[in-house]
Image: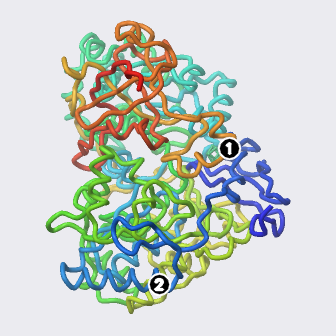
């Protein structure tokens, strides 16, 4: 194996991919992965992605030298670090002098460690002085974050430790296919079922998760809100709501009661296609016993009304008296590895570290004090991810973008428009460890260390802060993101301290987060080590951390949860004569997100080599499409060509394309960027398409 992939010691750490952050040990030569038994999230299990993750350390197309184009259209050529960094500093200075501070945008990622996310937000605000920063987590769970902030005053993944799931009576999973996205999570669901608990899944597809469920509700895409209101209507008519809890711990139920009155079971069945007896059984199971959980994932969240869809399920959970009680409640199944921590420390357009609002004067004063700058100099809120990408190169929009750990050419909706915007920039800089599809379009590419080559902290879907430890040396020529940020801050004469040491950056993050909602001030590397992770908020070193945050009070000013009445309106784009079929997008077991990492791992490529369109045999027959044939799928935004995979596990009015691939099978050529008004989440989960057999070349 190459020198850099040889181990130093057996190193306990966590998986590079999803928010479950399974524990693993790395060691041996070449590096070998062993699952850890001591991490509650995976208890000795890993999925195929985790088992094969060490292969990423030796991918043949690893970048080890900076690349630069002499001019637009010229090829990327190797250059020195000084040449690359000097040019970035000079170009950003020139563009800001001509167009103002917001001429430079920064785009981060939900896979970055807490330390990197924090440092990137600080870099944007005080080194560049730009408000134009956001991250790809906006495309992940931002609707759940907006809904939980509205209802509970705070947003934090699961309502308690993951081990609570195995003790539950009933779990309702809405729009989540954990059997494929995070398989070791299924152990907790299986444990619950083995104890007699009920698993209910809401999904337009009969996924691997739905197949394990005792009850599968298969609604028309875009109708989850009507379903949730219908379930609450039934809970009311059957006398299952917890009036005592509603009176003691919530506000606003009467408006919800009035709205859900109109969601008669037969009306909801007409809207959603879910039979009334299935709905009735669902509320009965949720209301039995005291320990039920409602968990939403991207299927409920990635909608132009995603915040309201999640709110409808939170209303149901509140009406049944679930949140704020041990072992029950509402939770979000966070997707990306640091989707949780990545949104807490300042790389979101509207937030400062500690989950503080950027337009809150007290928050600005506190954070500016830690950074050693005048609060007046901090920029205000910027554009959300898709709005930022759409503004690139336009009049009044950013002229340059610095991108870390993200691949929006594959992961953003309406991908061709995103490509056009990226190509219109004066300067695109991508920091990555391989030449992702987005890095291929960059003017300057900075080769970074990855995952097991550096250390830092991640916050998993439970809200538990974990340590990722360095297990191998990075190859010669690459730098960590923290080193890149520090070198640029130095060239830009930025105020403050710019450490390259994750432990030092974490200490600064602790101070910046102190007193905020996501208070990490009592969490130290030593405590994480000794305690196997610490739950935030944790406001002092003698505080035990907060595994279950809402037991006594919610994080609202009066401590009570807030109901919000929401009405079903349907998807932003409905099917019609021209585009008569619903498209929904999602994930498969052997690939992860935009695929920049997993499409380079041999076993994963063999398991899932290309995009496909999953469709019902009845629909295929109507359209003259055979199993395995190439199919042209067109929406109002573009056309993708993918292979047909016929299955009766999907509704006959709906097709599914996973979004992990680039090229002609890219699902996001088709998706609709209609944005949720609160979360600014695009509607990845439903749009209208037409399909036809692709004519042979
Ligand atoms: Fe990694 Fe997620 Fe798989 Fe666990 S479930 S091994 S964290 S990808």
Residue 206: percent from the left, percent from the top?
A: 50, 19
Mark 2 and mark 1: span between their CA atoms? 35 Å
Outermost residue, front side: 697
Please tell me whether mark 2 sits on a helix, a strand or a loop: helix
Q: Residue at horizontal 27%, vertical 31%?
A: 635
658 or 72: nearer the eye? 72
In the displayed structure, 200 sits above or below 425; it is: above
Q: Quadrant of residue 488?
A: bottom left
Which disc, if any, is residue 83?
2
Please tell me whether mark 1 sits on a helix, a strand or a loop. helix
Residue beneath disc 1: 602
Nearest to N terminus: mark 2 or mark 1 = 2
Q: Is residue 243 left or right of residue 647?
A: left
**Figure quadrant of the C terminus:** top left
Residue 553: x %, y % from top left: 42, 53
As drawn, 414 above or below 109: above
In this view, 697 is above or below 123 = above
Other-residue count near label 2 (Cα within 10 Å), few / some / many at <14 / 14–19 / ≥20: few
35 left or right, relative to 324: right
User: Which is closer to the viewer, label 2 or label 1?
Assistant: 2
Image-quarter location of ligand 1: top right
Residue at point 38%, 11% (across, down): 619
Colour mode?
rainbow
């Amino acid at each position: 194996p190459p020198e850099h992939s040889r181990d130093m010691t057996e190193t306990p750490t966590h998986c590079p991919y999803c928010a479950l952050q399974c524990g693993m040990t790395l060691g041996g030569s070449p590096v070998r992965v062993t699952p850890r038994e001591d991490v509650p999230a995976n208890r000795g299990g890993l999925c195929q992605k985790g088992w094969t993750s060490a292969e990423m350390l030796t991918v043949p197309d690893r970048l080890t030298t900076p690349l630069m184009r002499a001019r637009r259209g010229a090829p990327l050529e190797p250059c020195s670090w000084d040449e690359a960094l000097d040019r970035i500093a000079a170009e950003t200075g020139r563009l800001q002098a001509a167009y103002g501070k917001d001429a430079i945008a920064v785009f981060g990622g939900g896979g970055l460690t807490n330390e990197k996310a924090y440092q990137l937000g600080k870099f944007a605000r005080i080194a560049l002085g730009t408000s134009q920063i956001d991250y790809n987590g906006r495309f992940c769970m931002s609707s759940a974050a907006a809904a939980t902030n509205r209802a509970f005053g705070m947003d934090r993944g699961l309502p308690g430790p993951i081990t609570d799931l195995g003790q539950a009576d009933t779990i309702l999973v809405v729009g989540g296919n954990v059997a494929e996205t995070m398989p070791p999570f299924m152990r907790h669901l299986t444990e619950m079922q083995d104890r007699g608990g009920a698993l209910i899944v809401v999904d337009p597809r009969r996924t691997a998760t739905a197949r394990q469920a005792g009850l599968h509700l298969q609604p028309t895409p875009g109708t989850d809100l009507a379903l949730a209101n219908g379930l609450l209507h039934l809970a009311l008519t059957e006398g299952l709501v917890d009036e005592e809890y509603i009176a003691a711990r919530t506000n606003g139920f009467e408006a919800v009661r009035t709205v859900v009155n109109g969601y008669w079971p037969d009306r909801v069945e007409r809207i959603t296609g879910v039979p009334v007896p299935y709905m009735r059984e669902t509320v009965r199971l949720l209301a039995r016993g005291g320990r039920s959980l409602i968990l939403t994932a991207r299927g409920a969240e990635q909608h132009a009304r995603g915040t309201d869809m999640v709110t409808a399920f939170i209303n149901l959970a509140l009406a049944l008296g679930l949140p704020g009680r041990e072992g029950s409640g509402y939770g979000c199944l966070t997707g990306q590895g640091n989707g949780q921590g990545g949104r807490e420390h300042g790389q979101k357009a509207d937030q400062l570290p500690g989950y503080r609002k950027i337009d809150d004067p007290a928050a600005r004063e506190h954070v500016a004090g830690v950074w050693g700058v005048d609060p007046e100099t901090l920029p205000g809120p910027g554009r959300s991810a898709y709005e930022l990408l759409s503004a690139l190169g336009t009049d009044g929009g950013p002229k340059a973008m610095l991108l870390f750990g993200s691949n929006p050419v594959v992961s953003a909706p309406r991908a061709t428009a995103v490509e056009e915007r990226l190509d219109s920039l004066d300067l695109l800089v991508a920091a990555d460890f391989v030449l992702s599809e987005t890095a291929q379009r960059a003017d300057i590419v900075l080769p970074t260390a990855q995952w097991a080559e550096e250390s830092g902290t991640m916050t998993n879907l439970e809200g538990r802060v974990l340590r990722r430890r360095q297990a191998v040396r990075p190859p010669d020529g690459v730098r960590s993101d923290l080193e890149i940020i520090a070198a640029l801050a130095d060239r830009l004469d930025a105020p403050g301290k710019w450490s390259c040491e994750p432990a030092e950056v974490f200490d600064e993050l602790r101070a910046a987060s102190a007193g905020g909602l996501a208070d990490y001030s009592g969490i130290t590397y030593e405590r994480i080590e000794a305690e196997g992770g610490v739950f935030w908020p944790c406001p002092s070193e003698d505080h035990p951390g907060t595994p279950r945050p809402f037991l006594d009070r919610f994080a609202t000013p009066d401590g009570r949860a807030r109901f919000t009445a929401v009405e079903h309106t349907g998807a932003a784009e409905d099917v019609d004569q021209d585009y008569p079929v619903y498209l929904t997008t999602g994930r498969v077991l052997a690939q992860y997100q935009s695929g920049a990492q997993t499409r380079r791992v041999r076993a994963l490529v063999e398991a899932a080599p290309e995009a496909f369109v999953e469709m019902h045999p009845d629909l295929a027959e109507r359209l003259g499409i055979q199993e395995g044939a190439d199919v042209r799928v067109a929406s109002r935004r573009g056309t993708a060509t993918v292979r047909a995979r016929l299955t009766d596990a999907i509704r006959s009015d709906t097709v599914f394309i996973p979004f992990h691939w680039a090229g002609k099978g890219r699902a996001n050529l088709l998706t609709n960027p209609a944005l949720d008004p609160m979360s600014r989440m695009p509607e990845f989960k439903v749009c209208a398409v037409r399909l036809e057999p692709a004519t042979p070349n």
